[in-house]
Image (tube, coloured by chain):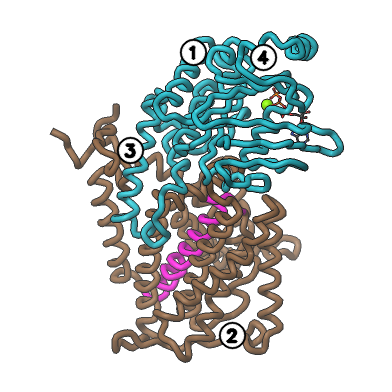
Amino acid sequence: MRNVWAETGNYKTDYRQDSSIFATRLEQLSLIGFLLALFLLPLFLSRTQMFVADLIVIYALAVLGLNIITGYAGLINIGQAAFMGVGAYTAALLAPGLPFWLTIPIGGLVAALAGAVVGIPSLRIKHLYLAIATLAFQVIFEWIVGHSPLLKQGGAIPMPRVVFLGYRVGYKNHYYFWYFVALVVLILLAFAFRNLLRTRFGRALVAVRDNDRAADAMGMHPGLTKIFAFALGAFYAGVAGGLYAYFSRAVVIEDYMLPVSIKFLAMAIVGGLGSLPGSFFGPAFLVLLDLNMEDFANWMKRLGLSYAGVDIASAMRPLTFGLVIVLFLVFEPRGLANWWRLVRNYFKNWPFRY
Amino acid sequence: MAQLEVENVTLVFGGLAALSAVSLEVEEGELVSIIGPNGAGKTSLLNCISGFYHPTRGRIRFEGHDLTHASPHTATRYGIARAFQNIELFSGLTVLENLLLARYTHLGYGLAAASVYYGRAQEAEVRARALVEEVIDFMELEPYRKAPVGNLPYGVRKRVEVARALALEPKLLLLDEPMAGMTLEEKEDMVRFILDVRSERGTTIVLIEHDLGVVMDISDRVYVLDFGEVIASGPPREVAENPRVLEAYVGGEA
Ligand SMILES: Nc1ncnc2c1ncn2[C@@H]1O[C@H](COP(=O)(O)OP(=O)(O)OP(=O)(O)O)[C@@H](O)[C@H]1O
Ligand SMILES: [Mg+2]
């Protein structure tokens, strides 16, 4: 009889099963267990630790969006933070009048529109030139915010505390509340994208990355497909931006500027470009690394280390950040997702090694 | 009215004419071959028909649609499929995924159905998969189903090209040297596939091929191109005896 719990080979019998998401029921169970653990996590974390957890979940959503554009559709995007900013500012402007469960999705839609507009040049230009178009968008976004009195010229726009189903979110439960909201949103949007990948839309993204001409010959419009990729990835960023706005209690331009876009690219690379789980590994790894380096730097500061007037401690964070990216590019360009793949394959055949 | 009509097509690249006043007609269900020395303009002609190039002068019509300025995806949607001379596959994807991409326009479900997957999208995908499996069966690609195309041997990739074109369920199939660089055995297989497509599906086929033996064997009619001009056309036997053709071949390839 077929053992659905551990299939040490490919025993799928029809096409429906073959394109199902999970190879085995064991894998299905592990995922449910993992998700459950994520929901129970707040029981074990302090308020400051929750701050970090929120940050990772929200960044993961933005990086997932970046992965859609850059990893799957192969369009380099140096403006993901600006798309996030579009969502955040939209939410900030609407928040006084509308509940968060409307402002955040609307922010996503406005960002998607911005993404579609930024994607228009892809009808004509490719590769590096297109990357410059996304960089231009980042710069224009910063300029507009910086010159717009409505947006406080980039200064802090406070976000209201929210009330949800009669439940007031205040100082104590703030990070817990937004953790659950962001986690639910991330899980829903990640599943939606995982579903898309099994359909004509997901395959079309990869098709325009691999071969434009052939994609055209398959009957799809390569340019429109790229615009779709930009809109979809920007939607994810916009939703992440709305969440970030509420989570950080204010919208400030610094959170959506060029260095953040670069940070997202680094997270996508370290996690693994074109990998869905990689979109979670990358942000988790780099956020935690950064935090540990901060602790380490503070510890060094107390020792009073400095060399030729350079404050080594404060240089530690950017240095390790850069070093880690270079190491990944050189030694594991497929990112942490590749390690994950190896572990998974090992367990797929476990306990039978051969 | 013929299914495909190419009327006086001229194609100029930087002052040089790759095609000059080429006219060609293909009836539904016909197998027409285009031969000619290297650089004669055969691929350029296919590029014009499939929308990759646009003629400088002249007209192209397919089943009454004007294709002169159409883009490749428009030509595909009218029912024209093509296997490229220089393999143009999605090299990072598997054979199966490459063929499923050919079902892109046939899969009608929208974005919402796709993000939920279960229901409409899944049903359509299962049907597409069944059709693609038929093509895989037909082209004898079963062993490579889940293999990334980039790693497959040349002969197999050529076969995947043809299979992907077939998965589009075209009315007109354009094959640009599908047997080039193949072993004798692989060539024989390909000839068999082409003849089977024709007899089983009644697909119109335009074939570019250098192997004159094959061309003379299987074509209904042959067009001979030389320096961008049609120098002869007609049933294989007539064309083979045409003095201009003999001259072009001796002059072109000697
Ligand atoms: N995109 C292009 N730009 C400039 N010249 C081109 C282009 N495409 C084709 N040509 C020229 O047009 C002429 C015909 O080329 P084409 O590829 O159609 O020949 P062919 O008959 O398919 O040859 P082969 O048997 O080698 O495949 C050649 O001289 C080629 O250099
Ligand atoms: Mg050619």
Work out which residue is located at the far left of the displayed protein and give it.
A1
C-alpha gap between disc 3 and disc 1: 27 Å
Q: Label 3 is found on which chain of the structure?
A: B
Residue B179 shown left or right of residue A142 in the figure: left
Please identify the quarter of the rendering in which residue A121 is found. bottom right
| Label number found at residue B239 | 4
Which callout, 3 or 4, points at the residue further toward the start of the chain?
3
Residue A313 drawn at (x, y percent): 62, 64
Q: Nearer the viewer, mark 1 or mark 4?
A: 4
**Looking at the picture, which amino acid does disc 4 mark?**
Val
Task: Report which colour depicts chain B.
Answer: cyan
Label 1 to label 4: alpha-carbon separation: 23 Å
Q: According to the rendering, which colour does chain A have? A: brown
What type of secondary structure mainly makes up the magenta span? helix
Mark 1 — on which chain does it sit? B
Disc on res. B130? 3
Q: Nearer the viewer, mark 2 or mark 1?
A: 1
